[in-house]
């Protein structure tokens, strides 16, 4: 099927993993390792305010020899959060990703965060179910 | 720490004349985001998910009718297996890329990615033949 005909919700990875802005980078990295995800959405008072990606952790913490236990998510997150509606076309999501040079967009449905659509989802047309680990 | 301690291996490689559809299939099955593209057996470029999304899928081009060499990023930037992880991170940060093919004794040995650096561990890639 052409990319223009599929909707974001057909191929997104769900649910999105979230953490509070005051969580340490060590906790965020642990989330990424356990869930296999490359990004975690950051919330403030339960509203999504930013996103931390594997690249943020590598370039802003690991490469700078900062202690991941002492750096907070809000210090390295990208904010404001760019999002896309779950019924947007895959073509539109892909266009935003390519134009902005990013890999992932959090997906919103009825005002709630429901998943993440990534370049990978667009290429493989395959939704992924993320296992959420509690620890 | 050295690159070879945390790289994913083996690297999946395909000839430059294979259709993009075959590259996508590798990405699906092996759960990887890049395939090294070779010309006469030597690494000539990388086909990454971003190239495929931008140059094939969003243009509604049939991936069976496009060759890997038409969409690959080239020349390929590589790193030696015994280089330090810091050096590899520096290259990725400067070039704005996520993955580097790893060369050991002149041969393609694996791929080191941002994810490997984050998790500090290698991944074994399962290669599917089809």
Image (tube, coloured by chain):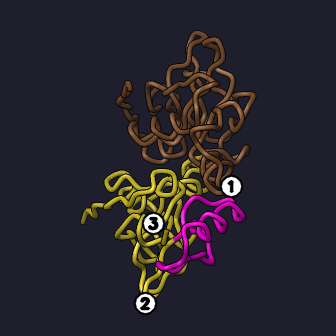
Q: Which mark is residue B71?
A: none
Out of B52 and A70, give the one closest to the viewer.
A70
Quadrant housing residue A84: top right
* Residue at image mark 1: A64
Q: Colour of chain A?
A: brown
Q: Is residue A25 left or right of residue B1?
A: right
The magenta segment is: B71-100
- Measuring from the top left, give residue B81's x and y in whole percent: 47, 78
Q: Chain for mark 2?
A: B
- Measuring from the top left, give residue B124's x and y in whole percent: 31, 61
* Residue at image mark 3: B35
Query: Could you tell me which residue is drawn at 45 percent across and 66 percent down?
Result: B35
Q: Colour of chain B?
A: yellow
Q: Chain for mark 1?
A: A
B80 magenta-colored = yes
State how far apart marks 2 and 1 are (Cα). 30 Å
- Discs 3, 2: same chain: yes
State how far apart marks 3 and 2 are (Cα). 20 Å
- How many neighbours does mark 1 have within 10 angstroms: few (below 14), some (14-19), or many (20 or more)? few
């Amino acid at each position: 099927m052409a990319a223009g005909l599929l909707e974001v919700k057909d191929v997104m990875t769900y649910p999105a993993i979230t953490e509070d802005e005051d969580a340490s980078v060590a906790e965020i990295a642990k989330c990424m390792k356990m869930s296999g995800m490359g990004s975690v959405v950051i919330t403030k008072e339960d509203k999504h305010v930013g996103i931390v990606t594997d690249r943020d952790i590598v370039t802003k913490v690991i490469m700078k020899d900062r202690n991941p236990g002492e750096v907070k998510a809000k210090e390295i997150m990208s904010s404001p959060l760019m999002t896309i509606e779950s019924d947007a076309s895959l073509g539109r999501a892909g266009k935003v990703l390519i134009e902005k040079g990013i890999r992932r967009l959090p997906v919103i449905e009825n005002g709630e965060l429901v998943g993440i659509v990534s370049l990978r989802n667009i290429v493989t047309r395959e939704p992924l179910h993320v296992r959420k680990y509690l620890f | 720490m050295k690159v070879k301690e945390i790289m994913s291996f083996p690297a999946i490689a395909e000839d430059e004349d294979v259709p993009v559809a075959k590259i996508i299939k590798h990405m699906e099955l092996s759960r990887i985001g890049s395939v090294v593209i070779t010309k006469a057996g030597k690494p000539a470029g990388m086909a990454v998910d971003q190239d495929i999304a931008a140059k094939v899928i969003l243009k509604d081009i049939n991936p069976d009718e496009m060759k890997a060499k038409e969409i690959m990023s080239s020349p390929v930037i590589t790193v030696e297996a015994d280089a330090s992880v810091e050096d590899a991170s520096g290259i990725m940060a400067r070039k704005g890329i996520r993955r580097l093919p790893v060369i050991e004794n002149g041969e393609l040995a694996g791929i080191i990615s941002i994810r490997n650096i984050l998790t500090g561990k290698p991944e074994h890639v399962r290669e599917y033949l089809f």
